[in-house]
């Protein structure tokens, strides 16, 4: 009698995401997320982690949105594991510190289901570090960590000179500091309250232990709080590195799709900014596909010597047409492949194609022409180039290739049309100056952003990738503050960061507090009122 084979057991990973900065996710956590079939947790709060690392087809269960209890969540994890699925249960912080990870682990162990625990970077060390406060050193060898929730014997933590880190101090700060002083901690001990630690909303207030609660109240800090008490807090003034980044906390508008903006947004985040991507164009197929069909047929039949890709969108359009015809990267065998820049080259490599030509200098049509060889009747058996491009592409590359002796099939591979307007809240933020800066990577992003969302406010810092983009911005009545040294996202983000650092230094030298450009708009509004 045949037996139905049992479904292999899945697994559950209890994964900590750390104290707030999504860049602090561990390598093991990233690996598990990338192979997850089900992810469970407060997903709205952890959106940066989920959006970056979770596969598109994974099932998502938002415990907060669905109002699931700890018991209900544990049953859900077990059910999916018994169905043979790989489940990731995400926790803000660490699964075994102030979370329900231990309860989940006990239930899974009782059910005989495999699980693992992936710790999150501890807030007890990460938050002080992001505030520029070491917890040991200079003769201080001990640190003590306590969660403020519930009843705490503060006398047990007040003695000596150990650095004290209190997690979740919001709402109880005055009671905690008074209890520590009553228990014997010197009221003059240096103390700091760190709000929203390790995120770009982080703010830190320093005072003595006796005064820190009042200073935090005056500063109107947002929860969660971390209280740090000890002599080493005095080192913050010279060790602060996170809140002193040149674009720290700046809300920067990036008028590009998520696919296009990835590298630029990553660079801006490295300078402390909070990029917000707003698509200004939509990519659509050409109105008449016959031209592309003829070009792909010619490619297969050996009509071309070179294929030049000037964008990832062009490569995507050709790849989609290949898939329609049942072709793959092997159809490029014997052809020479050019890519306008490293991003396009990387996309080619992802398809299994190593480009023969990538500009050694400027990553643009001009840079490509600088390195493109002239046609040679002896060395080149065919004199024709296949150039799949957007419908609005300039003629620079075509004219340059003709000058080098090549014939060019300039084919419209895709159309760029203006995207739908962003949400009303985003449009209002753009026009009212709630963005600190906007970065333009082409003239079309200038025209399209203004067309779908309106002109950025006068307080918004405008950064442009090149002279032509800057000219277009000025023609539309914008003041250009930053012009990149070279037409690359690295130069663009670095230029904006340099501008921000210079502004910060000028404010400090003038004895003024460091503010963001959007604060000027709020100050002007208050003064007008």
Image (cartoon, helix red, strand yellow):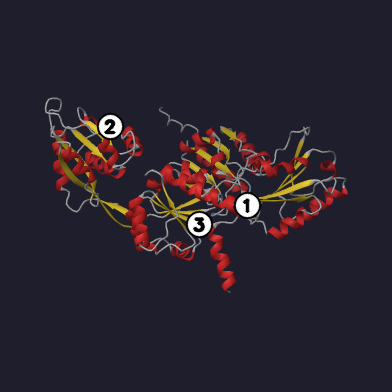
Packing grade of label 3 (10 A; few <14, some 14-19, many >=20) is many
Which badge, 1 or 2, comes first in the chain's sequence?
A: 2
Q: Residue 467, percent across and down?
A: 35, 51
Question: Based on the displayed image, in which of its 4 quarters is residue 166 positioned?
Answer: top right
Closer to the camera, 298 or 430? 430
Residue name at image x 34 percent, y 57 percent:
472
Label 3 and label 2: CA atoms lie apart by 38 Å
515 lies left or right of 402: right
**Marking on residue 509:** 1
Q: Estimate the x, y position of residue 339 in percent, counting from the top left.
A: 29, 36
Disc 3, SS? loop
- Residue nearest the observer in this picture, 28 or 391: 391
Among the 4 quarters of the image, the one containing residue 282: bottom left
- Percent across and percent down for residue 56 are 41, 44
For label 2, the crowd category at 10 Å Cα-Cα, with few meaning under 14, some 14 to 19 and many 20 or more, is: some
Q: Quadrant of the N terminus?
A: top left
The residue tagged 2 is 357
Identify whether 397 is placed above or below 429.
above
Asked whether the residues under the numbered discs 3 and 1 touch, taking CB atoms below 8 Å apart as contact, a structural biologist would say no
Tally of numbered discs: 3
Residue at (20, 41) in percent of width and height:
400
Residue 453 in view (yes/no) = yes
Give the residue pinned by disc 3: 436
Which of the labelled discs sits on residue 3, or is there none? none
- Where disc 1 sits, the SS reads helix
Q: Earlier in the sequence, mark 3 or mark 2?
A: 2
Residue 57 visible, this orientation: no
Horizontal side of 466 relative to 509 (left or right) equals left
Circle 1 packing at 10 Å, graded few (<14), some (14-19), many (20+), is: few
| Rendered location of residue 284, percent (x, y) | 27, 52
**Of marks 3 and 1, the one in the foreground:** 1
Sooner in the amino-acid sequence: mark 3 or mark 1 = 3
């Amino acid at each position: 009698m045949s037996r139905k084979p049992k479904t292999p057991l899945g697994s559950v990973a209890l994964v900590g995401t750390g104290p707030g900065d999504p860049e602090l996710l561990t390598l093991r956590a990233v690996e598990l997320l990338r192979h997850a079939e089900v992810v469970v947790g407060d997903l709205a709060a952890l959106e940066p982690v989920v959006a970056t690392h979770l596969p598109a087809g994974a099932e998502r269960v938002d415990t907060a949105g669905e109002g699931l209890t700890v018991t209900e969540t544990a049953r859900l994890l077990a059910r999916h594991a018994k169905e043979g699925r790989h489940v990731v249960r995400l926790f803000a912080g660490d699964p075994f510190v102030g979370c329900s990870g231990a309860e989940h682990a006990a239930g899974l162990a009782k059910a005989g289901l495999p699980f693992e625990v992936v710790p999150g970077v501890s807030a007890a060390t990460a938050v002080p570090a992001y505030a520029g406060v070491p917890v040991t050193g200079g003769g201080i060898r001990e640190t003590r960590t306590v969660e403020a929730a519930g009843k705490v014997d503060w006398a047990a933590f007040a003695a000596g000179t150990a650095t004290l880190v209190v997690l979740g101090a919001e709402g109880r700060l005055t009671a905690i500091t008074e209890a520590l002083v009553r228990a014997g901690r010197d009221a003059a001990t240096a103390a700091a309250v760190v709000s929203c630690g390790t995120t770009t909303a982080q703010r830190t207030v320093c005072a003595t232990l006796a005064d820190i609660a009042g200073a935090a109240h005056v500063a109107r800090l947002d929860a969660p709080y971390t209280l740090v008490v000890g002599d080493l807090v005095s080192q913050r003034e010279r060790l602060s590195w996170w809140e002193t980044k040149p674009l720290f906390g700046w809300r920067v508008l990036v008028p590009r799709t998520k696919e296009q903006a990835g590298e630029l947004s990553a660079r801006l985040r490295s300078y402390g900014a909070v990029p917000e991507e707003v698509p200004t164009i939509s990519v659509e197929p050409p109105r008449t596909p016959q031209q592309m069909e003829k070009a792909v047929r010619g490619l297969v039949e050996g009509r071309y010597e070179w294929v030049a890709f000037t964008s990832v969108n062009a490569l995507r359009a050709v790849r989609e047409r290949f898939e329609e015809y049942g072709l793959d990267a092997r159809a490029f065998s014997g052809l020479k492949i050019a890519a306008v820049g490293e991003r396009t080259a990387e996309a080619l490599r992802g398809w299994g194609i190593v480009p023969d030509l990538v500009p050694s200098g400027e990553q643009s049509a001009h840079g490509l022409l600088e390195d493109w060889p002239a046609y040679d009747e002896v060395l080149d058996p065919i004199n024709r180039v296949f150039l799949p491009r957007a419908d609005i592409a300039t003629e620079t590359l075509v004219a340059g290739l003709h000058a080098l002796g090549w014939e060019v099939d300039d084919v419209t591979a895709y159309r760029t049309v203006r995207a739908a307007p962003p949400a009303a809240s985003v449009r209002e933020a753009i026009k009212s100056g709630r963005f600190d800066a906007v970065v333009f990577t082409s003239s079309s992003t200038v025209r399209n952003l203004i067309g779908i969302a309106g002109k950025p406010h006068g307080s918004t810092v405008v950064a442009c990738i090149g002279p032509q983009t800057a000219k277009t911005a000025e023609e539309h009545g914008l003041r250009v503050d930053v012009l990149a040294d070279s037409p690359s996202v690295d130069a663009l983000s670095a230029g904006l960061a340099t501008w921000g650092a210079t502004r910060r230094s000028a404010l400090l030298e003038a004895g003024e507090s460091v503010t963001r450009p959007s604060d000027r708009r709020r100050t002007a509004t208050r003064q007008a009122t």
